[in-house]
Amino acid sequence: MFEAGDNFNSRYSAKFREYVYFVFNSSVLPPFLNNYVWHVPLKLDIEKLREFVGGFVGKRDFLLFSNESKDKKCVREVYFFRVKRFRDFVIFHVRANGFLRGMVRNMVGLAIAYSLMRLQKDESGNIIFNVRNVKSFKAPSEGLFLRKVGY
């Protein structure tokens, strides 16, 4: 440990943040997990989830995937976005230099929708993103946890 300088701000001095999102992927949800996971009873395809979230890695404008106004700067860099299965859990782990309000929940919700084949594609096979479908697949707040902040 060391003493922070006078200019230190816990919010603005962070170099990165990490979030994890837990999905319980089984037909029956144990009642004690109700407030801590998103229950998705249909079988999720981990490879499709990995394929989808890989598209978020890198520096880009995430306005469409946030709940922010158009006036805000929405360029963020996602360092990694991993998905793994552990028993009946599907765990999303994402690190970025910053997050926008609703960004992780929108990205996870869209990944789940992609895995369940609920997103529309155009003639060339590209997924059609618009404000309506991004917001309609938003994951619930249960399951989202701040894991780490790096300074």
Image (spheres, rainbow, N blue to C red):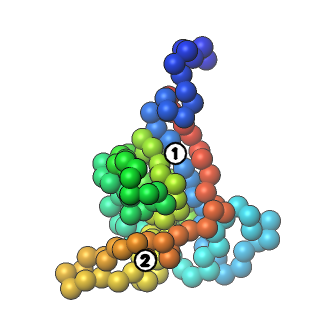
**Which residue, given by chain and number where applicable, does mark 2 sit on?**
133
Can you tell which quarter of the image residue 29 is in? Answer: bottom right
Percent from the top left, x then y, of residue 73?
37, 48
Query: Of helix, strand and loop, which one carries label 1?
Result: strand
Can you tell which quarter of the image residue 110 is in? Answer: bottom left
| Mark identifier at residue 18 | 1
Please name whichever residue, 77 or 88, is drawn nearer the observer in this view of the structure: 77
Please name whichever residue, 53 or 127, is drawn nearer the observer in this view of the structure: 127
Residue 113 seen in the current view? yes
Q: Is residue 95 above or below residue 55?
A: above
Can you tell which quarter of the image residue 97 is in? Answer: top left
For residue 49, side relative to residue 58 (left or right): right
Rendered residue at 52%/45% (across/down): 18
Q: Is residue 137 above or below residue 96?
A: below
| Mark identifier at residue 29 | none
Please name whichever residue, 23 or 100, is drawn nearer the observer in this view of the structure: 100
Percent from the top left, x then y, of residue 5?
54, 14
Please name whichever residue, 57 or 11, is drawn nearer the observer in this view of the structure: 11
Rendered residue at 46%/38% (across/down): 16
* Residue lying farthest to the left in this orientation: 124
- Residue type at tag 1: Glu
- Residue type at tag 2: Asn
